[in-house]
Image (cartoon, rainbow, N blue to C red):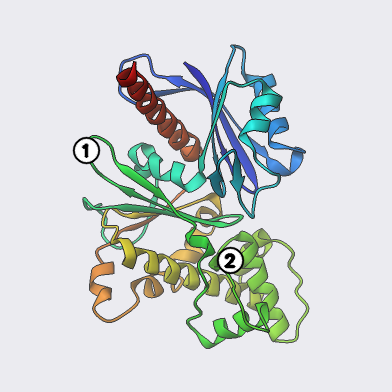
Amino acid sequence: MYFLAGDIGGTNGHVALMRAAGDGRPGGIETLAYRVFPCASFPSLAALLQAFIASEVHTPVSRCVLACAGQPMGDEVVNDNLAWPVRSDVLRATLGLDEVALLNDFEALAYAIEGPLAASGRHLCGPLVRGQGPSLVVGPGTGLGAAMHVPGSPHAAVFATEAGQMDFAPHSLRERKVLAWLAPDGGYVPVERIVSGPGLLTVYEALCALDGEVPSLETPRAVTAAAAAQADAHAVEAVELFCAALGGFTGNLAMTTMPTGGIFLAGGFLSSMFDLLARSAFEERFLHGRSVRALLAQVPVWVTEHGCHGVQGAAHWYLRHRATSDAREGAHA
């Protein structure tokens, strides 16, 4: 069975042509073609998928699974960060597909923990060896996502979250001032407003404004580059605040799940600034304090490239979903 698998974020769309492996391995997948597209280059998701089909697909395909930033609800994905609306019914009609399955992008990454994702990271802090408990995938990109993987038999369980929409909790006086700048009249400020690529730029702009200066950097990449070169004091402070806030947020999630199986910080954004992250206050803020510090010190943390892992995870989810559906239909036959 050939099928399309995609990992659609706010910046890039990863798409692959896949099929179940013919060697009899349960859940085995073969990737036949794989490409990455900038979402801003296409007027719709259908146009992006059509570009992949036109260039890479030379055999009839009628099924598709898409891991998308946001949460699937019925035929659509509810999100704040995608470049365009995503509706499975529209995609089916436009592309002539029989089936379009939708899942959360970090849910897909959590499924990828069963594949090469778990062995592909750079160690950041904590033990070097994974324990037997749950695992977390956390990732700041265009937004901020998280999902949990719980080992079990015959299959692991995966739980999607919208943790990035939780309220931001400032830790330092400077963070309180940034929060006040973002919401001068109070109110809800989600964590991803600060802990994301756009959030890093927002923090930089806030710090400049608080000090009465005009920001000179215009992209998150420019902020991280200036911080790495020690070329802009506000860029340096913005990256430090970002990393500390990411540590606190990740530690809060760890306290609710005790992921002794490890935490995987996913995304090219973090991989590109690994050295800055490694010497930041991430670990100190992650560990928090008091008795919980001893518990969190047992949780290993890695930074891993997002890459094709989301596509692989979406494909694993889809084959498991299809197998379960086929089994139910067989039982009712």
Q: Residue at x 30, y 24 (%)?
A: 26
Q: Would you name the residue on which mark 1 appears?
A: 153
SS type, badge 2: helix
What's the amino acid at mark 2? Ala
Closer-to-camera residue (165/35): 165
Residue ranking furthest to the front: 332
Residue 218 vertical placement versus 90 (above, below): below
Answer with the quarter of the image where residue 182 lies.
bottom right
Q: Is residue 9 above or below residue 212?
A: above
Numbered disc 1: secondary structure: loop
Upstream in sequence: badge 1 or badge 2: 1
Under mark 1, the amino acid is Ser
Residue 192 image offset from top left, x and y in percent? 56, 64
Find residue 255 and report its horizontal and vertical position in percent: 32, 67
Decide: is 143 above or below 47.
Answer: below
**CA separation, marks 1 and 2?**
45 Å
Residue 231 shows up from this direction: no
Q: Residue at x 56, y 50 (%)?
A: 70
The residue pinned by badge 2 equals: 228
Number of marks in picture: 2
Q: Which residue reaches farthest top?
A: 59
Quarter that holds the C terminus: top left
The residue sitting at 49% across, 72% down in the picture is 245
Which residue is at a point 76% across and 82% down the rendered structure image?
A: 213
Q: Position of residue 165 (x, y in %)?
A: 53, 63
Query: In the displayed structure, does residue 75 sit left or right of residue 90?
Result: left
Q: Nearer the viewer, residue 91 or 82?
A: 91
Residue 92 figure quarter: top right
